[in-house]
Image (cartoon, rainbow, N blue to C red):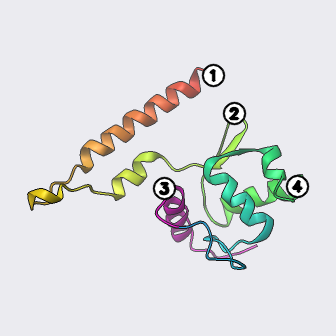
Amino acid sequence: MSFNRNKVEDNKNTEQVIFGNSSLSKGVGKKNWLDHSGACEKIDEMLIRGANFNQLLTSGRKESAVRSHLNHLKSDHGLPISNSGGIYKFDFPIQSNLSRNSFTKPSSGKDQTHEPTLIEIGKILEKLSRKGDSND
C-alpha cells in the first residue's frame, strides 16, 4: 500500500482518466496513474466505468483483497467511490469536469466562455440522476 499519497493529485489524475484527458496506464510493464499494477490496476480500470463485485473479483484478487483495495483507494488515495445498485465506480460529478473546461468560439477572435451555461447543464443532469436513483 502507498502511504502519504498526494490525494489532490490522485483525484485530479483519476478525474482526467475518467473524462478521457489522460491514458489509463503508463505503458507495458509500468504502473497506472495511481502507481498500481497487476490485479489492483485491473480493479482501478474497472472502477472507471463501473463494475459489480463479481466483476471486480475477475481481477484475480480474493473478496477480502478487493474490499481492502476499495478501502485503500478511499483512505490512502482519497478517491470517492460510489456503490449504487451494486455497481462500484469512481464518483466524480460531471460538472466538476465541465467547470475545468472553458469552451471558446475560435472564429470570433474573442474569448467567449460558455462555462456558466455548461455548469448549469451539469447541475441539471446531476439533479436528474439523483431523481432517477431515488425512484429505484
Quadrant of the rendered image containing residue 35? bottom right
**Dot placed on the residue nearer the N-terminal end, 3 or 2:** 3
First of labels 1, 3 by sequence position:
3
| Circles 1 and 2 in contact, beta carbons < 8 Å | yes
* On screen, residue 121 above or below 47: above
Considering the image in quadrants, where does the N terminus appear? bottom right
Tell me how far mark 3 sits from mark 2, CA to CA.
22 Å
Viewer-side label of 3, 4: 3
Q: Earlier in the sequence, mark 4 or mark 2?
A: 4
Say whether residue 17 is visible: yes
Drawn side of residue 8 relative to residue 108, left or right: right
Q: What residue is disc 3 on?
A: 19
Percent position (x, y) of residue 10?
Answer: 56, 68
Q: Which quadrant, please, contains the C terminus?
A: top right
Residue sticking out furthest to the left: 109
Q: Are marks 1 and 3 in contact (CB under 8 Å)?
A: no
Question: What amino acid is found at the position of numbered circle 1 in the picture?
Answer: Asp
